[in-house]
């Protein structure tokens, strides 16, 4: 299956939060983002999954008006990212890879400073601060210095800050980078709560396979191009069926018996592979069919690792996403 066959962008009549057509970014002779096109529906959690240097962060920089595209076009919240850049910045929240909080201020003071930058009406500031701290479960740390926060708490506060001015789209660039699995899980509870309770569209980049599983749809990006785009379930289904691998005392006889019982099975170099709809549910009946001849049994369900390997011919590199040096300062300088 080719990358084109694996790209599904049919959102029906759902209103769009992000529209991208042929977006390209070149740095001299190097093409960081190569003619990408996709759409994100309002209220959707959309993930860019790819290794370091794939073009994830460069694409987000363009969508957030931090970099100008070399060619192509894009709209965020219905606004052109080039001709309406200032208006776009009013409609988005952005959490950088690198922490940009002032750790000598309290959580509340960081949020109040952000409220001033974004022109949040003064009579709404207190209520919004209370609300966003509730969304990320930090209400009890409102008066605490950020210097006393753990890394996970600081990331959650940054998400709260990104939501303070009620953006229509929240961009999260590797939001859980460097956090332990338990803290990543808590972060995802916060993100899904934002979607469910605030109706915000969430666009994130990640290289964590298990993190991308939480998204409504995933775009796998590699070497600047989108090579697959669909729901996590559909992407895994494109790779193949669940399998149960067996080694028996007589593989030839076992294979014949399984085929006679209606299983789709084939011989391999190490035994037998049986293709099933649900590997967990199928193991018991298969073993019962073969009785005491079974020596080993292994069940496997396609994962996003398999998907990435299928479409790229290699495993995703376990490194962080491409960094955006000085992103925070660039963003601050261009606000207004």
Image (cartoon, rainbow, N blue to C red):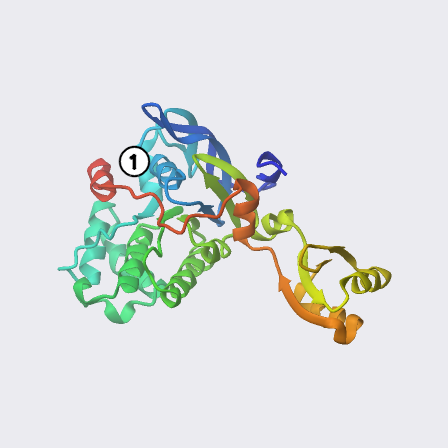
Mark 1, residue position: 66
198 relative to 12 in the view: left or right: left
> In the picture, residue 149 is in which quadrant?
bottom left
Residue 81 location, x and y as percent? 37, 32
Q: Looking at the picture, does residue 247 appear above or below residue 54?
A: below
Q: Residue furthest right?
A: 260
Viewer-closest of 47 and 191:
47
Residue at figure coordinates x 22%, y 53% from the top left? 122
> In the picture, residue 9 is in which quadrant?
top right
Residue at figure coordinates x 21%, y 61% from the top left? 108
Residue at figure coordinates x 56%, y 51% from the top left? 306
Q: Secondary structure at mark 1?
A: loop
Q: Residue furthest bottom?
A: 292
Viewer-closest of 127 and 7:
7
Viewer-closest of 69 and 121:
69
| Quadrant into which the C terminus falls | top left
Residue at figure coordinates x 29%, y 68% from the top left? 139
84 relative to 43 in the view: left or right: left
Residue 154 location, x and y as percent? 26, 60
Residue 271 location, x and y as percent? 70, 60
Q: Looking at the picture, does residue 40 appear above or below residue 240?
A: above
Q: Looking at the picture, does residue 314 appear above or below residue 211?
A: above
| Quadrant into which the N terminus falls | top right
Q: Looking at the picture, does residue 165 appear above or below residue 106?
A: above
202 relative to 134 in the view: left or right: right
């Amino acid at each position: 299956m080719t990358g084109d066959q694996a790209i599904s962008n049919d959102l029906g009549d759902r209103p769009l939060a992000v529209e991208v057509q042929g977006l390209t970014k070149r740095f001299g002779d190097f093409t960081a983002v190569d003619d990408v096109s996709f759409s994100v529906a309002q209220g959707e959690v959309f993930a860019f999954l790819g290794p370091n240097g794939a073009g994830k962060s460069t694409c987000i920089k363009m969508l957030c008006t931090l970099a100008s595209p070399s060619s192509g076009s894009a709209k965020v919240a219905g606004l052109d990212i080039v001709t309406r850049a200032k208006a776009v910045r009013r409609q988005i929240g952005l959490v950088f890879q690198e922490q940009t909080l002032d750790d000598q201020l309290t959580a509340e003071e960081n949020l109040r400073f952000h409220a001033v930058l974004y022109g949040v009406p003064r009579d709404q500031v207190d209520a919004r601060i209370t609300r966003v701290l509730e969304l990320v479960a930090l209400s009890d740390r409102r008066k605490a210095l950020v210097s006393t926060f753990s890394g996970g708490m600081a990331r959650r506060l940054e998400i709260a800050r990104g939501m303070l001015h009620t953006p229509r789209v929240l961009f999260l660039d590797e939001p859980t980078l460097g956090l332990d699995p338990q803290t990543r899980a808590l972060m995802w509870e916060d993100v899904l709560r934002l979607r469910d309770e605030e109706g915000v569209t969430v666009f994130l980049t990640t290289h964590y396979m298990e993190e991308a599983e939480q998204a409504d749809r995933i775009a796998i990006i590699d070497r600047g191009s989108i090579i697959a785009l669909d729901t996590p379930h559909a992407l895994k289904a494109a790779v193949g069926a669940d399998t149960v691998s067996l080694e028996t005392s007589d593989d030839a006889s076992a294979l014949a018996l399984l085929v006679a019982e209606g299983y789709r099975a084939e011989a391999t170099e190490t035994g037998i592979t049986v293709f099933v709809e649900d590997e967990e549910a199928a193991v018991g009946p298969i073993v019962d069919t073969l009785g005491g001849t079974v020596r080993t049994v292994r069940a496997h369900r396609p994962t996003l690792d398999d998907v990435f390997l299928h479409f790229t011919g290699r495993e995703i590199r376990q490194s962080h996403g491409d960094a955006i040096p000085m992103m925070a300062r660039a963003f601050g300088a261009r606000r207004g």
